[in-house]
Amino acid sequence: MKAIRYHQTGGPEVLRLEEVPEPQPGSGEVQLSVHAAGVNFADTERRRGLYDAKVPLPRILGSEAAGIVADVGPGVDKALVGKRVVAWTVASYAERAIAPVSSLVALPDTVPFDVAAAVPVQGLTAYHLLRTVGQVQEGQSVLIHAAAGGVGGLAVQLAKAAGMRVFGTVSSEAKARLVRELGADEVIRYDHEDVVAEVHQRTGGRGVDLVLDAVGASTWAASLAALAPFGHLVSYGSASGPPPPVDVDSLFAKSVKVSAYWLHTPHPPGTHVRALESLIRHVAEGKLRILIGLKLPLAEAAEAHRRLEGRETVGKVVLTVR
Ligand SMILES: NC(=O)c1ccc[n+]([C@@H]2O[C@H](COP(=O)([O-])OP(=O)(O)OC[C@H]3O[C@@H](n4cnc5c(N)ncnc54)[C@H](OP(=O)(O)O)[C@@H]3O)[C@@H](O)[C@H]2O)c1
């Protein structure tokens, strides 16, 4: 089969389209014929050697796939063969990928493969940031950085659906328009507006209840300063570099909380698959909009990475495989 692999860490140019053996499903696993694979910012960090650096190379990238079950491993119901599914899995920048049967979510015919491939990583992250970590309530306010991005755009919609007042930061006017369309109440151009001053001015000086920050180094100080008393800052990434160490003394004045979220932390069994089922149902019912900002063939994975790292993309970046 064809797959995108890298033999050494580095820039997008290390990604190569290669002919490799098809992976075989083990016990409790299926082999997917991949139709679309999602691209995530973490894939660019893995490729640069900043994340998951202990995984041996060469490596096939990719954390999510939508496609058709092509084969099943020992003990798995053969009736699954031919079913349309989506899964949060590994090594999905490829024509075939393996997924545990327990991770599969059935796809309604109305949800195209490219749309489905956009949901697992970014959808689950947005869902858990708001529900599991933020435990958000109607009437609260949230500041979402990089709100036009993959996780950001979904978090804006889920936060609005939960009845929150949503603030989004973006780096261009085109992104600002999009975030307003997705339902944000307030958009801040953090390339030239002062985020803290804008948040305080637009909240009567109070600040926001929750900040979701995956930008890191360049936004951290503003994220803390934008919090309302008893507010909560959740770090879930570091697109601009890691945030500084937390100075606990600085949290006292407003009694604020700082926490972190990672999708790979062991969650109670079945949590991710149930959340993914609900997200796919919302997509099928038209309640959650999946914006595919860039769709390229598998062979152009390097270009997809270049554009994502260059802050040129909005919404989801998808590789089409067949
Ligand atoms: N903790 C977890 O489990 C988890 C899971 C999924 C994703 N994440 C993290 O969530 C973040 C978003 O991921 P995503 O896949 O949805 O990507 P994305 O938001 O679609 O793309 C990254 C965005 O970050 C913003 N950004 C700000 N400073 C940047 C910089 N120096 N370099 C590049 N981008 C910068 C850009 O938006 P603007 O131009 O508008 O600033 C860019 O479009 C990433 O940090 C990722 O690692 C974490």
Image (spheres, rainbow, N blue to C red):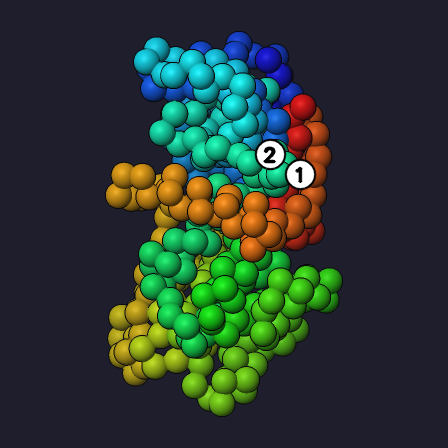
* Crowd around label 2: few <14 · some 14–19 · many ≥20 (10 Å): few
Tell me: residue 270, above or below residue 35. Answer: below
**What is the residue that sits farthest to the right in this orientation?**
174
* Labels 1 and 2: the sequence-earlier one: 2
Question: Image quadrant of residue 297?
Answer: top right
Q: Secondary structure at mark 2?
A: loop
Vertical comparison of 27 with 272: above or below = above
| Percent x, y of residue 89 | 44, 31
Where is mark 2, residue-wise?
A: 109
With 253 as the anchor, is 72 left or right in this view?
right
Other residues around mark 1 within 10 Å, as few (<14) / some (14–19) / many (≥20): many
Asked if the residue at label 2 sits under 8 Å from ligand 1, the reply is: no
Q: Is residue 112 above or below residue 220?
A: above
Q: Amino acid at mark 1?
A: Ala
Q: How far is the residue under mark 1 from the one under mark 2? A: 27 Å
Return the residue nearer the eye: 76 or 216.
76
Please tell me whether mark 1 or mark 2 is closer to you in this view.
2
What quarter of the picture does the N terminus occupy? top right
The x, y position of residue 57, in whole percent, is 47, 22
- Provide residue 295's location: percent of width, then percent of height: 70, 38
Relative to the observer, which residue lies in front, 41 or 247?
41
Residue 173, picture quadrant: bottom right
Residue in the picture at 28% in, 78% down: 255
Tell me the quarter of the picture where residue 264 sits.
top left
Distance from mark 1 CB to nearest ligand 1 atom below 8 Å: no
Q: Given the image, on which type of amino acid does mark 2 rest? A: Asp
What residue is shown at x 48% (from left), y 13% (from top)? 71
Q: Quadrant of the C terminus?
A: top right
Q: Which residue is mark 1?
A: 304
